[in-house]
Image: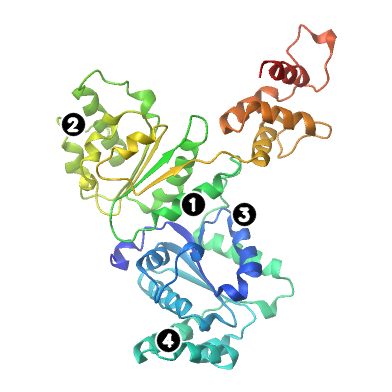
Amino acid sequence: MASSSSLCRSWLYHVFVSFRGEDVRKGFLSHVLKELKSKGIIPFVDNEIKRGESVGPVLVGAIIQSRVAIVLLSRNYASSSWCLDELVEIMKCREECQQTVMTIFYEVDPSHVRKQTGDFGKAFEETCVGKTEEVKQAWRQALKEVAGIAGYHSSNSDNEADLINKVASDVTDVLGFTPSKDFDEFVGIGAQITEIKSKLILQSEQVKVIGVVGPPGIGKTTTARVLYNQLSPGFPFSTFFENIRGKYEKPCGNDYSLKLRFHQNLLSQLLNQKEIEVRHLGVAQNMLSDKKVLAVLDEVDNWWQLEEMAKQREWVGPGSIIIITTEDVKLLKQLRLGIDHIYEMKFPTCYESLEILCQYAFDQNSPYDGFEDLAREVTWLAGNLPLGLRVMGSYLRGMSREYDTYEANHPPTLYQYTRRKAQTK
């Protein structure tokens, strides 16, 4: 595990949530997470991590790389050694990384947490059985510190919704940004972003290589752009190298000059220097091997574009992340350095497809009154490719629904257009 000091500023998540599942998972916690996500805040929750005897490096990495930690203290929180180990790591990050720690006392008295008394104290004592004095002391100290943080008390709030909204608003203030609009016009992308980011927890300072694969129009570039916007503040050197396929023609044989131009442009963007001279293919590695970079290589369609980077991960410095979007999964599998994860973009559901169409056709998330059946039919005709749905919706915007023979020489109505498409499908 890399030292915490080397990862403190590599924020991958906005918030890490520490909680006792049996107390809050199905109720209070689910509402907290929903409210955070609605404000564009990306939380890490350890639902998917296999639990063992102690908190492992994956979870420690997630704690270190979260800007804010929310500790949801409940009656049975101290009955879990896992929760107590998490808390020790969180309080360590508070001291070493200036991580902001926020506490929610959910149906538990802060004094019981601080002094380990009452039902909370009984649960703690049971968990301490068989543990070393060193471990028990670390737990006690962490509980004392976290209980001393001014937090939110469920007992002082008549309305949980107001309490949750207050927590989410305060997290937004701590993060220092206005609510994110990244996901607003891209239906279903938020869940895909969260899933990809879950693969980026840095267990060490290794270089991470992630592939994003899918057909044209499914949203690979959009997804990569949102990832880039969220991750780039944590990297001193970053670039979104867009539309590689369109900017670099496929070389005939070994087109050395094309490769040099590719590397020169990549270096120029990463280092923000226009006048960079690249005389051989080793220049990029010489200049980047000690630098932590975030690079998105968008629309890669040929092996030569990855050839030099593929030879070794040391092409870029420790802690770097390379995100590659492509239609061709075989290109990724040819990388000798290996891909840490290949993410296949998911098509929208029927409901999401209808919502996408409506956003562009009606400027809202649902059809106008009386257009419901027709909108569903158009969605079916357009298929479930996001780009196709946007194009179709934009084309149909403003068209009337009724068929009018008098307007035969005018642009087709929505009804006419749908009928014609149905006849040719």
Residue at the spot of label 2: 278
Q: Which image quarter is the N terminus in? A: bottom left
Q: Position of residue 402 (x, y in %)?
A: 83, 20
Separation of disc 1 and disc 3 at Cα?
Answer: 17 Å
Whether pointer 2 and pointer 3 mark residues with C-beta atoms closer than 8 Å, the reply is no
Picture layout, residue 330 above or below residue 81: above
Amino acid found under the numbered disc labelled 2: Val
Q: Earlier in the sequence, mark 2 or mark 3?
A: 3
Residue at the spot of label 3: 38
Q: Secondary structure at mark 4?
A: helix
Q: Earlier in the sequence, mark 4 or mark 1?
A: 4
- Please name the residue shown 74% across and 75% down the image: 158
Q: Earlier in the sequence, mark 4 or mark 2?
A: 4
Q: Position of residue 302 (x, y in %)?
A: 32, 28
Amino acid found under the numbered disc labelled 3: Ser
Residue at the spot of label 1: 195
Separation of disc 3 and disc 4 at Cα?
Answer: 35 Å
Q: Secondary structure at mark 2?
A: loop
Q: Answer with left or right where residue 121 lies relative to residue 402.
A: left
Residue at the spot of label 4: 141
Mark 4 neighbour density, 10 Å: few (under 14) some (14–19) many (20 or more):
some
Q: Earlier in the sequence, mark 3 or mark 4?
A: 3
Let me know if residue 45 appears in the view: no
Whether pointer 2 and pointer 1 mark residues with C-beta atoms closer than 8 Å, the reply is no
Q: Nearer the viewer, mark 1 or mark 3?
A: 1
Q: Secondary structure at mark 1?
A: helix
- Please name the residue shown 42% across and 67% down the image: 63
Q: Position of residue 293 (x, y in %)?
A: 30, 47
Q: Position of residue 353 (x, y in %)?
A: 64, 36
Separation of disc 2 and disc 1 at Cα?
Answer: 37 Å
> Residue 172 shows which numbered tag?
none
Front residue of 4 and 405: 405
